[in-house]
Image (spheres, helix red, strand yellow):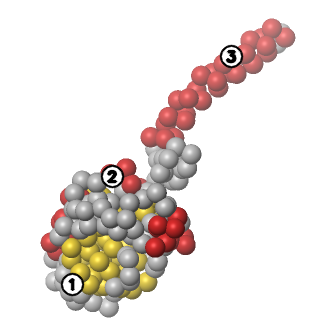
Amino acid sequence: MSRGYFLTRRLFLGTAAALAAPAIARAQAMNGSTELERDISQSTRHNISSFRTLDWRPYFDDTRQGAILVDITSRALHFWSEDQSIYRLYPTSVPLTEDLTRRGRTEVVLKDPNPDWRPTPAMQERNPEWPDYVPPGPDNPLGTRALHLSWQYYRIHGTHDTRKIGRRSSNGCIGLYNQHIEELYEMARVGTQVLLI
């Protein structure tokens, strides 16, 4: 083989690799290998591969009053009705960091049909520019419905910012699309058992 053949081949392969790089990056983004978080500087993997239906039995002794399982890793909320005739699986937003994440057993203690919002003391400390109060409406971070849990300040609620769903984007709560929290709100009861894993 001549030296010219090898130079031509090397030039061809280098050019092909350079041209393919943007297409490979786009394909990776479309296949879920990257996902934007709160801003462009942060990224995390999509949760689609672990977003699957589950059976309630490994998590609850029964489905008395209904059961809600929140899987922080897959960013999914599972709901089973008391008689197990209804099963729903919803994508969620989850807490930004581990120190904001709470796991364990709790229950729904209040159903709020028109939530207003006040930042917790810890939120005010981290974000002093935030308002002290936001009334119900389109600017409310709790969306159109909220299920208050027995843990102080923790809720399962809606959000008007749909970019947050499927991401680590909350200050501790579990967020759902407004249409999903409205559906869950109708099925859940005060006393519905909740497990965050």
Q: N-terminal of the two: label 1 or label 3?
A: 3
Horizontal side, residue 83 vs residue 165: left or right:
left
The reply to whether dot 3 and dot 2 touch (C-beta < 8 Å) is no
- For label 2, the crowd category at 10 Å Cα-Cα, with few meaning under 14, some 14 to 19 and many 20 or more, is some
Reply above or below: 92 against 27: below
- Name the residue: 17% across, 74% down: 187
Residue 108 placed where, x, y %?
27, 82
In the drawing, does residue 25 fall left or right of residue 138? right
Q: Which mark is residue 161?
A: 2
- Residue at the disc numbered 1: 190
Q: Amino acid at mark 2?
A: Asp
Q: Residues within 10 Å of mark 3 (few under 14, many from 20)?
A: few
Image point (19%, 67%), residue name: 114
Q: From the viewer's perspective, is residue 13 above or below residue 136?
A: above
Query: Which amino acid, mark 1?
Result: Val
Q: Position of residue 142 (x, y in %)?
A: 30, 64
Outermost residue toward the right in this view = 3
Q: Amino acid at mark 3?
A: Phe
